[in-house]
Every structure is written in structure tokens, then in C-alpha cells.
Image (tube, rainbow, N blue to C red):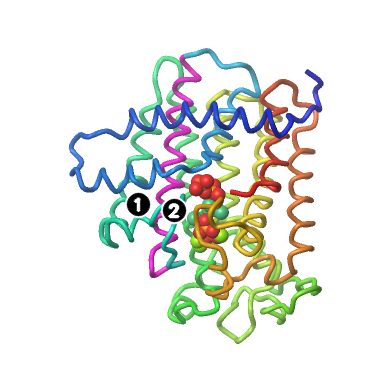
Amino acid sequence: MNAQRAASAEEVGKALRTEAARIEARLDACLRAGACPAGLLDAMRYSLFAGGKRVRPVLCVLSARVPVPPDPDLADAVLTFACALECIHTYSLIHDDLPAMDDDDFRRGKPSCHKQFGEAAAILAGDALLTEAFALAAGCAGPALPAGRVLRAVAATAKAAGPAGMVGGQFLDMLYTGAANPRLGQAAGARAVQGGILPGRAAAGTRSGQSGAAPRFAQPASVRAGQNGDGPGLEDLAAMQAMKTGAMLRLPCEVGAVLAGASPETAGALARYGTALGAAFQITDDILDIAGDAALLGKPVGSDGAARKCTYPALLGLQKSRESAEQHAETAVTALDGLEGESAALLRGLAAYVVNRVS
Ligand code: IPE
Ligand code: IPE
Ligand code: MG
Ligand code: MG
Ligand code: MG
């Protein structure tokens, strides 16, 4: 196969279906009755098996195949680690839909976890998926997968899922939401950003490139967005999305490389790919909230606008948002320059899939 080849949409679709089936079978085997109360397991499995695309675990298993085709035992251990990432992602969706956050009633084509089981069970199902994920991940160490690699991958997972990653980004998302609880801003928003726990950024942000639809946040960006009357700008939005979504899309690529013992060059290329893919993924998600079909998405459209969320379409309009997503997808493809093989070709093809998807 040509080193620079990108897999076609058909090939990507087929690979996603094949890998997703393997991931779901392993998830099913991993999340079975045990010491867990039956009602809690029901809520966990309800959301987990409601039909997600499984993009994150697929990225993990493909990334682990880029350096060398792994031996079957290593591939088997990587598959379980990939399932742990899907558990964390599913927990983030359950909590994201809660009334205190995005207050969305549908997810993956079914009533959201809290609509089906109530808020207490949904909160606890999310907590349980998160903690169980770390048990699954740590348990991957064995003869085929050295404990040192697993430890590095677990540390990367905690970082990406936690306050400097997804959870921190979700906090900023709520801070930037039009109707957000003002206590978020007053309490810890600006201090957390400035205090070093979150990535450093310029004090004064970029002006949003205005065009098309009237922007909701016309003021200059500020890390104190929401505190001084200014709204978040493009730089704030990019940083927030890199945390809330980008971290959990870069992570599987990074972890795949670590678990497979990739060279620093290959690991770096996969991490750059995942970072750009994450940006393309969330911008496309924001676009689909306006231009998508709820029946295909399995979740409501118009939810961001109703909540006055800070999104790319809100700041830039749809056309410029589409261009931005395309640019990030191209950056992702370029990051893999020089990497050969079928898995790298599939990853290149996945970049196009991410921006062209309808679900
Ligand atoms: C939705 O993620 C949440 C975002 C980070 C945009 P996905 O679009 O991957 O959702 P599922 O897993 O397929 O349901
Ligand atoms: C959520 O972003 C990202 C997460 C970390 C779950 P969104 O709130 O836009 O995701 P959807 O549109 O509800 O899936
Ligand atoms: Mg959200
Ligand atoms: Mg949401
Ligand atoms: Mg969304």
C-alpha cells in the first residue's frame, strides 16, 4: 500500500463496523454482573450499548497497529484498554446530558440515562463507568503487555479525562454557556485557568473572525470570560474544545502508541494527528447541532443554540466553521506523513470521515 494513501469512505466504514463489533463484544464480556448492584449495572450497560460510533476505541486499536502489527496477545490486551476509553467516554456523555449540564433528553437514539433511570442512577452509572475504566485499564498488564507501558497509558488516561482535560473543558463549556450558573464564574473559573492547573494561554484572546451570522460573543476574548461582561472569543473556544473533546480523541492515539512501544517519532505523529482530529471532531459536532438530522445523530439538534453555548458556528458562522474543520482534518492527515501501512491509511481516511459524518 502506498505510504500516503488514505483509505476510502467505504474502507473506513467497513473498518469502523468490524472494529466496533469486536469492541462491543469485549465490553460485553468486561461489564458483567458481579459485586455491582443490578440496577447500577443496568444503567451503565444501557448507555454503553445504546449504539455509539466507538471512534475512540477504534483510534486506539488502529494506532497500536501503526508501529508494527501487534502479536495477538498484545492486540487482545490493547482491545481491553480501548474498551476502558469507551467507558470513560460514555460516562462523559451521561453526565453531559444531565439537567445541571446540557439537559438533553436523548442520547444514542434512546432516552438519556437520567430520563430512563433518574438522575441519581445516571450520576452513579457515570461514576461507576469512570472508575471501572481504570480497573480495566490497569488490568491489561501481563506477559504480552509490560506493566511499565500500562502505567504510562493509565497516567495519560487520567490526565486526558481529568481537570486538565475533559472535565476541565466541560467546566469551561459550562462557564461559557449563555445561561450558565453565575456561581461557576465567580467561584473557580478564572482562578483555575490562571493558577496553573490548566494549560497556559495568552491573557488577551484572539478576536473572533466575524462573518456570516451575527456572532453572540462579539467582545474580545478573555480568560476571565463571564466575569467582566466579555464573552469568550475564538481562542477561548479552541482551548475549551481542545480540553473537553480534543483530549479524549488525542488520548487513544497516544495510548495506542505507548502500548505498542512505538518510537518517539511515531508516537509524536500519532499525538499530533489525534490533536487535530479532536478539533475537527468537535467543530463538526457543533455544526451538526445546527445542520444535522436528530434521527441520524441519535441526539437533539438545536440544543447548543437553545442553551446559548459558545460554539464555532456561533462565533464564525457555518461556512467558516466547515472550513476550519476541514483544515484541522488536513492537519491530521499531514501529521501522519511517512507512516506506512493499512492502519495509517485508515487513520487518514478517518479524518475525512470525521468531518463528513452525519451521526
Ligand atoms: C459525542 O461524541 C460527544 C462529543 C465529544 C462531541 P461521539 O459523537 O463520539 O458520540 P458517540 O460515542 O458516537 O455516541
Ligand atoms: C460534549 O460536547 C463533550 C463531552 C465531553 C461529553 P457536547 O455537549 O457538544 O456533546 P453532545 O453534542 O452533547 O454529544
Ligand atoms: Mg456539553
Ligand atoms: Mg451535550
Ligand atoms: Mg454537541
In which quadrant of the rendered image does the N terminus lie? top right
Task: Identify the mark at residue 63; answer none if there is no mark.
Answer: none
Give the residue drawn at x 33%, y 40%: 132
Tag 1: amino acid: Gly
Residue highlighted by disc 2: 92
Inspect this view and state whether residue 286 appears.
yes
Q: Are marks 2 and 1 in contact (CB under 8 Å)?
A: yes
* Label 1: element kind: helix
> Does the residue tagged 2 have its C-beta within 8 Å of any atom of ligand 2?
yes
Answer few, some or many: residues within 10 Å of disc 2's Cα (few below 14, many 20 plus, some between 14 and 19).
many
Tag 2: amino acid: Ser
Inspect this view and state whether residue 169 appears.
no
Q: Is residue 79 magenta?
A: yes
Task: Identify the mark at residue 126; answer none if there is no mark.
Answer: 1
**Residue 227 lies in what quarter of the image?**
bottom right
- Magenta stretch bounds: 73-101
Give the residue drawn at x 64%, y 74%: 232
For the residues labelled 2 and 1, the Cα–Cα distance comes to: 7 Å
